[in-house]
Amino acid sequence: MFEKSSVVFALVVTALWGCATGVQAQTPASADSSAEAPELPPPSASATDFWATDLGSGTAQRGKASWYGKRFHGRRTASGEIFKMSALTAAHRTLPLLSYAKVTLLSTGKSVIVRINDRGPHILTHRIIDLSQAAAAELGLLDRGTGDVLVERVVARSDDDPPPAPPPLRLPPLWNR
């Protein structure tokens, strides 16, 4: 009746069509503003307010970062929050949602603390993090679009924690004459 190749072709086209449509499950927005996620205070831009998390070796990631803004502004993120391109947030594939990360642009040494509130970037893009427009502006990535970064997971310090230890002294070598 039907040729085997035409049936296989139809199944492949159907599968590809389903992947290409990009259907996303979204929760309906309610008219009640109290149903939205609570507005968290913006993270401090000072790195001294955060401790690096000791998660063992290999916890910091080096790779490419990009940014996203206007196209996604006002949409829900994976954490359920509404994306605001003016907030210091980011999308990461594996860091826990609503955790914090310190992103350092390797070419300039500039850093910014962001809250992970979304998932991404897509695995085929070879990027490790997508920053909000505000975070990209802090790092100076708006004109470039992408940049090489170091991403480290951090946790907020509490007032009970001891102050951070000063960095070790690096003295120049002594040369004997």
Image (cartoon, rainbow, N blue to C red):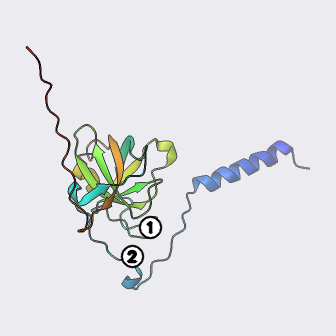
Q: Is residue 62 above or below residue 20?
A: above
- Give yes or no for contact between labels 2 and 1 (Cβ–Cβ under 8 Å): yes
Quarter-of-image position of residue 149:
top left
Residue 9: x %, y % from top left: 75, 45
**Of 81 and 100, which appears nearest the observer?**
100
Sequence-first disc among 2 and 1: 2
Q: Is residue 31 above or below residue 79?
A: below
Label 1: which secondary element: loop
Q: Is residue 166 left or right of residue 13?
A: left
**Of 23 and 90, which appears nearest the observer?**
90
Residue 35: x %, y % from top left: 42, 82
Report which residue position mark 1 lands on.
Answer: 79
Q: Work out how far the residue at label 2 is from the one at label 1, CA to CA, in angstroms.
A: 9 Å
- Crowding at mark 1 (Cα within 10 Å: few <14, some 14-19, many 20+): some
Residue pushed farthest front? 176
Instruction: Please give the name of the residue rendered at 24% of the width and 49% of the height, measured from the top-left corner.
Output: 111
Residue pushed farthest left? 177
Label 2 amino acid? Ala
**Of 81 and 22, which appears nearest the observer?**
81
Report which residue position mark 2 lands on.
Answer: 37
- Crowding at mark 2 (Cα within 10 Å: few <14, some 14-19, many 20+): few
Residue pushed farthest top? 177
On the rendered image, what quadrant is the C terminus found in?
top left
Quarter-of-image position of residue 74:
bottom left
Q: Is residue 34 above or below residue 64?
A: below
Instruction: Please give the name of the residue rendered at 35% of the width and 49% of the height, measured from the top-left corner.
Output: 152
Label 1 amino acid? Ser
Label 2: which secondary element: loop
